[in-house]
Amino acid sequence: MQETDFLKGNQRVLNDIKKFEIFEPFQEDELHHLMSMSKIRKYNPGETIFEQGSADTWLYFMVYGKVRLMKDNKPVAMLQRRGDVFGEMGAIECAPRSASAVAVGETVCLATDIYYIEQLTGNDKLAFGYVIYRVFSGVLADRLRATTEELLELKGRSIKIW
């Protein structure tokens, strides 16, 4: 993995991530806060981004490439859209990762250490925390909706033997 320093004040990267649909709810100053907690990480094909069972507070936003999520060494999802979010469950719960993430081809991510949200104070903490958790809830709602549709499709295919 190759990694930049924290991106505080990096206007070029800021202008680029403003184009991500997921960052639409953010105000300019909130994006500056996000950048101060973020690094750009580049992964080679087959490189592990994080391992199932590991624990950290990093959250990832896809810039480009593909990421395969693996649970017990079995593929469960492929992320390949700009702005796709992954690693949020471990970051939210501060619990061991429930799956591994592996780069499929050259992959670049905006990695954000949400530990720093807890270090903010007063209105900054409330405002920024609200926006980031709103983003999380949108991501989780989309994933729940997709999972429900898959489940309904599978149930429709099942053969009942009674």
Image: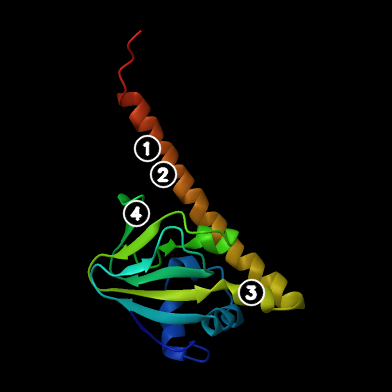
Judge the density around disc 4: few (<14), some (14-19), many (≥20) Cα neighbours within 10 Å.
some
C-alpha distance separating marks 3 and 2: 29 Å
Q: Amino acid at mark 2?
A: Ala
Quarter of the image with the N terminus is bottom left
Q: Left or right: 69 with respect to 10?
A: left
Residue 88 location in percent, x, y? 50, 61
Please give the label number shown on residue 146.
2
Quarter of the image with the C terminus is top left
Q: Nearer the viewer, mark 3 or mark 1?
A: 3
Please give the label number shown on residue 117.
3
Residue at the (36%, 49%) spot, across then down: 72
Contact? badges 3 and 1 (CB < 8 Å): no
Q: Left or right: 10 with respect to 47?
A: right
Which label's residue is closer to the chain start, 4 or 3?
Answer: 4
Contact? badges 2 and 1 (CB < 8 Å): yes
Q: Nearer the viewer, mark 4 or mark 2?
A: 4
Residue at the disc numbered 4: 70
C-alpha distance separating marks 4 and 2: 18 Å
Judge the density around disc 1: few (<14), some (14-19), many (≥20) Cα neighbours within 10 Å.
few
Q: Amino acid at mark 4?
A: Met
Q: Amino acid at mark 3?
A: Ile
| Residue at disc 2, secondary structure | helix
C-alpha distance separating marks 3 and 1: 34 Å
Q: Left or right: 44 with respect to 147?
A: left
Q: Nearer the viewer, mark 4 or mark 3?
A: 4
Picture quarter containing residue 67? bottom left
Residue at the disc numbered 1: 150
Residue at the (37%, 26%) spot, across then down: 155
